[in-house]
């Protein structure tokens, strides 16, 4: 029988990190707060891929791809906001 912690996997990490990143974005710097949120989501994808969680609704592949894609998009968007010279012509 699996415990509750096994079923949740990386989702508490993503939730806590998201709350902290959004608070950082609101209180201090929106660009780096967005980047931090992207990093937290990408770390959640890595932990999910490494075997964390036994969520039965979606497959591990779908969760990993979704978290990684959104995390990478947030990191790229926040870097473009922070450094406009990175914007493609």
Image (spheres, rainbow, N blue to C red):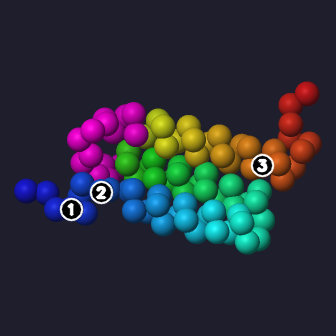
Drawn side of residue 53 relative to residue 34, left or right: left
Q: What element carries label 3?
A: helix
Region rendered in magenta: 50-63
The residue at which mark 1 appears reads as 4
* Quadrant containing the N terminus in the rendered view: bottom left
Q: Is residue 60 above or below residue 36?
A: above
Q: Residue 59 carries which label?
A: none
In terms of sequence position, does the residue under pointer 1 or pointer 3 come before the other?
A: 1
Residue 14, percent from left and from top? 47, 58
* Quadrant containing the C terminus in the rendered view: top right
Residue 56 sits inside the magenta stretch: yes
Q: Residue 79 carries which label?
A: 3
* Residue at x 23%, y 58% (from the top left corner): 6
* Residue at x 29%, y 52% (from the top left corner): 53
Residue 62 sits inside the magenta stretch: yes
The residue at which mark 2 appears reads as 8
Residue 74, percent from left and from top? 66, 46
Drawn side of residue 47 relative to residue 42, left or right: left
Q: Is residue 29 above or below residue 77?
A: below
CA gap, disc 1 and disc 3: 37 Å
The answer to whether the residue labelled 2 contacts the one labelled 1, judged by CB atoms less than 8 Å apart, is: yes
Q: In which quarter of the image is residue 5?
A: bottom left
Q: Is mark 1 on a helix, strand or loop?
A: helix
Drawn side of residue 68 relative to residue 84, left or right: left
* Residue at x 31%, y 36% (from the top left corner): 58
Q: Nearer the viewer, residue 77 or 42?
A: 77
CA gap, disc 2 and disc 1: 6 Å
The answer to whether the residue labelled 1 contacts the one labelled 3, judged by CB atoms less than 8 Å apart, is: no
CA gap, disc 2 and disc 3: 31 Å
Tell me the chief SS of the magenta region. Answer: loop
Residue 30, percent from left and from top? 76, 60
């Amino acid at each position: 029988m699996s415990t509750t912690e096994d079923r949740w996997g990386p989702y508490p990490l993503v939730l806590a990190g998201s709350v902290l990143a959004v608070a950082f974005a609101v209180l201090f710097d929106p660009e780096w707060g967005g980047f931090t949120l992207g990093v937290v989501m990408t770390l959640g994808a890595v932990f999910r891929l490494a075997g964390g969680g036994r969520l039965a609704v979606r497959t591990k592949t779908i969760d990993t791809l979704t978290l990684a894609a959104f995390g990478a998009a947030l990191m790229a968007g926040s870097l473009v906001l922070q450094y406009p010279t990175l914007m493609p012509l």
